[in-house]
Amino acid sequence: MLFTIARAIAWGRAAAVATVIGNASGMFLVSLLVAIGLGPLLQASKLFYNGVQWAGGAYLIYLGYTAISASKVDAHGMQKTQGVKPAFVTSIKNGFWVGVLNPKSVVFFAAILPQFVDRDKNNVTAQLILLGAIFALIAFISDGSYGILAGTVRQWLSGDIKRLIFMRTSGGVVMIALGLFTIFSSLLIN
């Protein structure tokens, strides 16, 4: 959710919605992988879990840096054209990789979803996939709502060039902070 809000502040509603589409798709892919057995691997291998967590944190830091760098372009051009924002498809890809590289989703799906599966039924994998799809849909609706709201507030505040630059920079700072938090929480837990 915070990632989506940061993207909305930095780039607007369309980028936030695209990010949510990608993130929900990434989470659904993670639920598929958990359904076919990746969850136990991440639970068993601390090194693999940490590697995925560090990659996710590094990716968030990269996205934050990109948002901050873009905030330094010609301010008048930013106000007129909303600057050099990522293409819709690029925002989907960014959201997708954030969803896929979040090992907490894997652990969540592996730990929580099996509790809602009826093991007496034949197709446990199909049940897990359905639960993952429902979770991704709920995340899409929830995160999408926050993203649209944050993007609307951004549009309202963007009449002033300095505020627009500040919002883009602050969105990038939030993404970097999330990335650092992800990496440091992994280091502190171990």
Image (cartoon, rainbow, N blue to C red):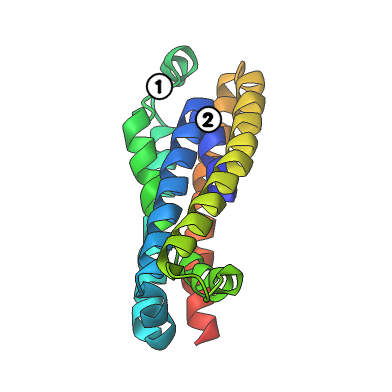
CA distance separating discs 1 and 2 = 10 Å
Residue at image position (39%, 27%) is 73
Q: Do the residues labelled 1 and 2 touch (CB within 8 Å)?
A: no
- Left or right: 1 as drawn, with respect to 15: right
Q: Given the image, on which type of amino acid does mark 2 rest?
A: Ile
Residue marked by disc 1: 74
Residue 57 in percent (x, y) is at 43, 63
Q: Given the image, on which type of amino acid does mark 1 rest?
A: Asp
Residue at image position (45%, 69%) is 124
**Mark 1 or 2 closer to N-term?**
1
Q: Nearer the viewer, residue 54 or 26?
A: 26
Instruction: For label 1, count other residues whose C-alpha is less than 10 Å away and answer few (under 14), some (14-19) or many (20+).
Output: few
Residue marked by disc 2: 165
Above/below status of 2 relative to 34 = above
Q: What element carries label 1?
A: loop
Q: Please identify the quarter of the rendering in which residue 111 is found.
A: bottom right
Q: Which of 45 and 117 is in front in this view?
A: 117
- Left or right: 4 as drawn, with respect to 37: right
Q: Please identify the quarter of the rendering in which residue 185 is found.
A: bottom right
Residue at image position (47%, 64%) is 128
Residue 174 visible in image? no
